[in-house]
Amino acid sequence: MKAAKMRRYASKITDWHLGLRRLNFFLVNSEVRSYHSVLRSSKDDYRHKSVAKMNYATSCVNLSEDPPKEKDNRVSDMLIDSYGRMHTYLRISLTERCNLRCQYCMPAEGVDLTPKPELLSLTEILRLANLFVTSGVYKIRLTGGEPAIRKDIEDVCLHLSNLNGLKTLAMTTNGLTLARKLPKLKECGLTSINISLDTLVPAKFEFLTRRKGHEKVMESINAAIDVGYNPVKVNCVVMRGFNDDEICDFIELTRDRPINIRFIEFMPFDGNVWNVKKLVSYSEMLDRVVKKFPGLRRLQDHPTETAKNFKIDGHCGTVSFITSMTEHFCAGCNRLRLLADGNFKVCLFGPSEVSLRDPLRQHASDDELREIIGAAVKRKKASHAGMFDIAKTANRPMIHIGG
Ligand code: SAM
Ligand code: SF4
């Protein structure tokens, strides 16, 4: 490794560890009591609000948002890979920008942003989305960076939701600026929402995201329930020593509310200082949950489902685990990714990308674009390389790929 690169890595590692030590420092120095009382009061405060909100939950979670599983003849050959997997789900990254700086997603020094003229315009996004939907894609997820910071996000939703054949328009968002936009987004056809939240403790949120805003995210979760999203999916990346002690607190959120809490195994991407010691495996999480909630039972999952879904007897919401690292779900993968710069990616962990923007701007016909897309889909590997190889393979930072 070159010296400059080594230095960059060293500073990233130091940043993470210093941060955690700062957090631990809270626990061992004289501020320990006040830290615990902040922690307790913020949890109690949250629980209080959550009870207050109880009455707003109109019905309990029904997880199936995917259409039926039978073979769909509408799916064109362009979307079928050499293993017979039908790719009917497109994730579109709407921006590389973000109003948070999550340590597991964004390198400490930030990322180089693609100059605006090299990003897809709304017209280009819509042309490509239309091409995918007319070929058989029935679910689109908007992601980023932070998709909700786009000024035209309502327009984006309106246009996409009007594509004939699209059944689900979903968004993954950090929830920071979401609450006030939600009623309009719903009107514009956003059918499903995932809000990312990794801790119930505001001080830890600020540490992890390098920004304030915990309260705003909580507000957005409540607002999403209030406008009727069911379930409201909450994404939580579990990291040892950071939030693995909060798993059961997160599950408490599902007791009276239509929340699907999704525990995600920590994944390696460029610049996020992944380390196997920080990974809390699915089986370990499950062990902990079963001890506290013996009424946990597995739900039947859709074959293309990335999550392992569970319900706890008596709880309104549900609990899921996204086990990309320890039990990958490549065999049923139906996902494709369009990045903000117009690159097309067939696997989250595969480094290969092909530009759709360039041929688009060279006036390629729909058939020519279909050919490029189809060829990339056919090159998709049977499965990703396994977590240790992924950690060593060059890939882009998550913020560029969009999850
Ligand atoms: N900004 C939005 C958000 O945070 O929800 C959308 C983009 S973000 C890249 C999409 C999802 O990827 C989030 O739920 C985030 O928690 C998750 N994510 C990011 N980095 C990750 C990592 N290293 N391992 C697991 N999940 C990760
Ligand atoms: Fe931004 Fe989402 Fe990445 Fe956090 S996870 S830095 S909110 S894109």
Image: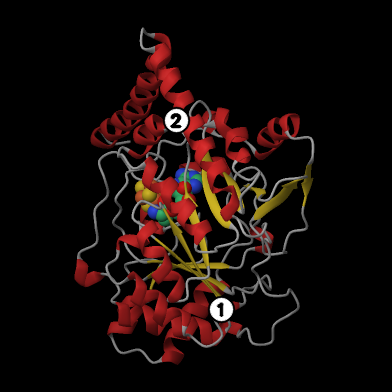
Kind of element beneath mark 2: helix
Count of all numbered marks drawn on residues in the image: 2
In the picture shown, does residue 109 fall above or below 348?
above
Which residue matches tag 2?
42
Q: Quadrant of the N terminus?
A: top left
Which residue matches tag 1?
137
- On the question of residue 158 being in view, the answer is yes
Residue under the point 39% across and 15% down: 34
Q: How is the image coloured?
A: secondary structure
- Mark 1 C-beta closer than 8 Å to ligand 1: no
Task: Tell me which amino acid carries mark 1.
Answer: Val
Determine whether label 1 and label 2 are within 8 Å by CB.
Answer: no
Kind of element beneath mark 1: loop
Residue 114 locus on image (x, y percent)? 24, 61
Residue 236 vs residue 344: left or right? right
Residue under the point 31% across and 67% down: 341
Sequence order check: which comes first, mark 1 or mark 2? Answer: 2
Along the line of sight, which residue is nearer the eye, 170 or 386? 170
Instruction: Classify mark 2: residues with Cα within 10 Å, few (<14), some (14-19) or many (20+).
Output: some
- On the question of residue 394 being in view, the answer is no
Q: CA distance from mark 1 to mark 2?
A: 43 Å
Instruction: Classify mark 1: residues with Cα within 10 Å, few (<14), some (14-19) or many (20+).
Output: many
Residue 297 locus on image (x, y percent)? 79, 46
Q: Is label 1 or label 2 in front? A: 2
- Mark 2 C-beta closer than 8 Å to ligand 2: no
Along the line of sight, which residue is nearer the eye, 280 or 45? 45
* Residue 78 image-quadrant placement: bottom right
Which labelled disc corresponds to residue 365?
none
Residue 202 locus on image (x, y percent)? 39, 34
In the picture shown, does residue 59 fall above or below 37?
below
Task: Tell me which amino acid carries mark 2.
Answer: Ser
Residue 343 locus on image (x, y percent)? 38, 69
